[in-house]
Amino acid sequence: MPKNSKVTQREHSSEHVTESVADLLAHQEPVDYKRSVLNVTGEAWDKQKEGDEELDAENRPAWNSKLQYILAQIGYSVGLGNVWRFPYLCQKNGGGAYLVPYLVLLIIIGLPLFFLELAVGQRIRRGSIGVWNYICPRLGGIGYASCLVCFFVGLYYNVIIGWSIFYFFKSFQYPLPWSECPIVKNGSVAVVETECERSSATTYFWYRETLDISNSISESGGLNWKMTLCLLVAWSLVGLAMIKGIQSSGKVMYFSSLFPYLVLVCFLVRGLLLRGAVDGIMHMFTPKLDKMLDPQVWREAATQVFFALGLGFGGVIAFSSYNKQDNNCHFDATLVSFINFFTSVLATLVVFAVLGFKANIMNEKCVVENAEKILGYLNTNVLSHDLIPPHVNFSHLTAKDYNEMYRVIMTVKEGHFKELGLDACLLEDELNKSVQGTGLAFIAFTEAMTHFPASPFWSVMFFLMLINLGLGSMIGTMSGITTPIIDTFKVRKEVFTVGCCIFAFVVGLIFVQRSGNYFVTMFDDYSATLPLTVVVILENIAVAWIYGTKKFMQELTEMLGFRPYQFYYYTWKYVSPICMAVLMTASIIQLGVSPPGYSAWIREEAAEKFLFYPTWAMAILISLIILASLPLPLVFILRQFHLVSDGSNALSVTYKKGRMMKDISNLEDNDETRFILSKVPSETPSPMPTHRSYLGPGSSSPMEMSSAPNGRYGSGYLLASTPESEL
């Protein structure tokens, strides 16, 4: 080395050396240290492997357009829950007043965590397994837990799509098959089916014709071949949409994401023209402000926000990982979050406009039936004609006239009123009947549509909408499985996708036996709620407290070109973890307080009855929760005690002349680390952030590497001291 070089001068000086790595390398020729004596790992240089790694990020599939990506995220987050869960919660928890806690929690929990998942996926450009292995190898189990939950949810979610497919094909006939009770012959006499007569035509069609349901979860009853065939069609649709990755699923999203909005708008316009629609909407949005003080309302609002955005499943990360590095994911997070919210409000308007119409129909039916009872009592002198107001006309009896007559009779016959068997027939009572989930979609809404003019057309549109809503969510859910597995284990995309769909179909046969609906309820209630809450809490902690909020904010600044609001710093570091911890605690308490059970349809009684799960079903239920959560402690223990490698401890550096990468290793207070900057100021940072070497507790790495050099971005040296405690 020349005598006048900076390094030589420093050797003969007593001053503290603070020379930057950039200065030290200024006079050196570019060297690939993986092929040199500085390859300290002792690994043999594999030219083929290195070439594959360099091309990996560059060859990663990408969305054809920003619109396609936004539609994919909307299609994933806007699902069946927006149509049949949110309206029920809104009605149950104070009408318009429920929107206040929901919106507050959307802003302080939903939006920040949704932005966080979008950002880590776009920054690291890997599925959930790769992302959390990079951020904190010990918490790498987060990705595997997400995959398991996605699998459990996908199993039963596709069954619901199968039910919708069955109703869709049954809608191509007039009158609709669930509009009237079937007639059966008893010898030479034709009578109405007893089970249907004691319930309703739509209820009978759902439980008997569609599900052919057994009386309890313990009575399997064998496979329902109609539902088995529909489930096969549903998995075939998902497989075809997913087989080419985002190249195929992205195109499907143009239809599956936009069509539901067309149908909702059509239903809203049609619903508003129906008699009684305004009654339903007014009932829905009349605020009951006292409900806002109920902690249960806030818990249910937080849970709905959590699931509405698809947090923790890995689908959000998977979709975001196919973005360009400079995509404005903050804008995407805000846009998708509020589109999701307004979609829920739109669906609520549609549902209660239609249910308001149905309530008026049912109320008129109640008035007619009870008016006939009163006429019978008048003709048999049980009631006196003097009790009937003079202006009442039984030929054109209105609900108002009946209510007036009802109150008079109740006052006069107070001692014997119950024996008369008269109903109040109040519209408010009909509107207060809370219906959610399958009961709303396959019973209440289908019954309302039978009273529509051209009812088959509206039925076809409605169930085609449900199919598309379900398909959009299923594509995101399956991406939460396929993307991280393909990224991590380098399996062939088409083979894995087809194999996954076939395996899921075979396992999903438990949902299409006659007792299958009870298993759907079990999986829906217990397979995802608690494990996903834990997953999202650990995601938040991994980024905010282990990786470092300041460091993450700085990387976002470099990636986006602007610094995100300080609001996100405080929500990620303090507000969201605390809120999620409270939600998890409340969920555990709710599980303990509410005995695990399900609503069984009893054929002989033609009614629902709450039953407790038998011992073997409880074992399955507990196993679901444990299995979904098991990767979290398992991966932590394996990596804590170095029983398995995290794949990040290959210490090597590659360098290409003229292409050096800038990276931030530590942005905590008093950080004096200096970094190598690109020689070209306009050079874009590598899409794959440099990965820290995982050397165990208390260890530090004097050298870190760029793990994904590629032809477009290049790579370079990175030397920095990063203690394990700051990983």
Image (spheres, rainbow, N blue to C red):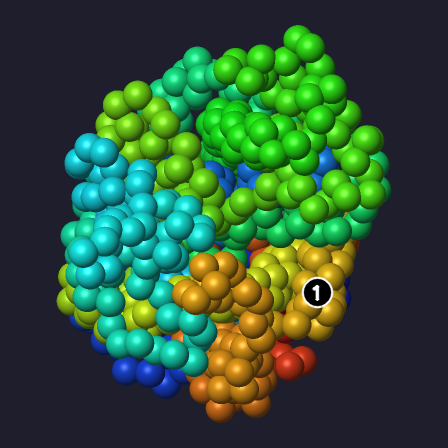
Left/right placement of residue 629 relative to residue 164 reads right
Whether residue 300 is visible: yes
Q: In the rendering, at what x and y percent does residue 711 appear?
A: 26, 49
Residue at horizontal 36 percent and vertical 27 percent from the top: 451
Up/down of 649 relative to 538, above or below: below
Left/right placement of residue 701 relative to residue 123 reads right
Q: In the rendering, at what x and y percent does residue 365 appear?
A: 50, 30
Give the secondary structure at mark 1. Answer: helix
Residue sticking out furthest to the top: 391
Up/down of 384 relative to 83, above or below: above
Q: Quadrant of residue 390?
A: top right
Residue at horizontal 54 percent and vertical 77 percent from the top: 613
Left/right placement of residue 485 relative to residue 491 reads right
Residue at horizontal 57 percent and vertical 67 percent from the top: 610
Q: In the rendering, at what x and y percent does residue 556 appear?
A: 55, 42
Q: In the rendering, at what x and y percent does residue 464 appear?
A: 27, 38
Q: Quadrant of residue 434?
A: top right
Q: For mark 1, what is the residue? A: 590
Residue kind at label 1, given as amino acid type: Gln
Front-most of 185 and 678?
185
Q: Residues within 10 Å of mark 1 (few under 14, many from 20)?
A: few
Total count of labels: 1
Quarter of the image where the C terminus is located: bottom right
